[in-house]
Amino acid sequence: MALVKYLMKKFIPLFVGSLFFFSFVLVLVDLFMNLWGFISNGASLVEVGKIMVLYFPKTTWYAAPLAILFAVSYTLSDFYANNELVAVFASGVPLIKFTFPLLVFSFVMSFALFVFEDTVVVPTYSKKIQMQEKALNQQKTLNNDKIVVMSEKGNIVYKADFYDNSAKRLYSLYIVIRNEDKTLNCVVRADSALWMEDHWKLSGAVKYTLADDTLISSEVDSETVQKLTELPETFRNNTVSIETVNTREAKAYINHLMRVGLPYAEPLSVYYKKFAFPFIMFIVVFLSVGLSGKTRKNVMLISLASCISAAVLYYVFQMVTMLMAKFGVLSPFMGAWLPVFLFVVLSVVLLKYART
């Protein structure tokens, strides 16, 4: 118990301090990236300050793995440099047992980081994005063009040249209606369609059907119109950033993309990343243990360099796997979890060859 108290007494202040430091650095990076935009658009100092404060929870979420990696690496390297671990090993306590409290702490922090992201980071980051877009005059319109939407489990397909969100009207609309066995029922062509509370009202519409290989055109009957109930929100330019919504909302949005036949690989991989990323907290403790004790000189410099190198390697590899998931090379699940699996193996290998 005395060893545990001594270990945590040296580790906790380092973890908290490095967490604040790395978070602050990320906030500054974001500020400098957008500084010219804020100046050119006349954003006030108070407005910029609010945006940076709202970004702080997100940077804390990003910095947590880096902070715990540095804190554990430096703590153990300092123990090695001062020969304090010699006494620990001589007393019969192996390295894995000595660092077990750190593993427990990181495991608990993994769950805490997930809850923190879902309840605190998401709303603050979403508000930060909204305020930043307003300050930089980057507000997005909900009007949309070149739209293709699948509805009713693929039985109805809408294709429109343009959607006017304020008028809730579709222009140059084609609708393909299929039977339950996926055979063609009819094709409807309309100059425009106006949303009428529970269905689309067609203007300049013609219905085309096939009978004995003969194309027949006719007016659109009320039975066909009553099938056109896809909500206007579906046609909006309302691409949702999965990072700005919680897991429940993200899952609902992905189900919507699947239902209407839109690409969903990228948002699904980001959704899985919400679960995968927090557990890097647990993995990097193994990595820190394996990286510690490599030198007795320049402990601070070596620890900082090793943890930054490991973090950069992880984030770059994660970017690559997420891109591969986006383009279908990897599944969305593997795009999010492959870096975690790889670093588990790397951590175990480093731990095996760590000095004891």
Image (tube, rainbow, N blue to C red):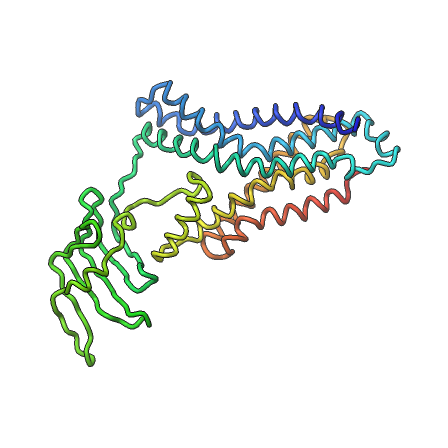
Q: Give the residue at x 82% y 27%.
A: 84
Residue at (34% x, 22% y) in the render: 39
* Residue sitting nearer the eye, 28 or 126: 126
Q: Is residue 260 left or right of residue 98?
A: left
Q: Quadrant of residue 228?
A: bottom left
| Quarter occupied by the N terminus | top right
Q: Position of residue 157 (x, y in %)?
A: 28, 61
Tell me: residue 41, above or below residue 159.
above
Q: Position of residue 140 (x, y in %)?
A: 29, 38
Left or right: residue 200 versus residue 59 is left
Displayed quadrant of residue 85: top right
Q: Is residue 349 left or right of residue 259?
A: right
Q: Quadrant of the C terminus?
A: top right
Name the residue furthest bottom: 212
Q: Position of residue 101 (x, y in %)?
A: 72, 34
Q: Is residue 254 above or below residue 27?
A: below
Q: Residue at x 31, y 60 (%)?
A: 152
Q: How many marks?
A: 0
Toward the viewer: 146 or 94? 94
Q: Position of residue 341 (x, y in %)?
A: 62, 49
Residue 191 vs residue 89: left or right?
Answer: left
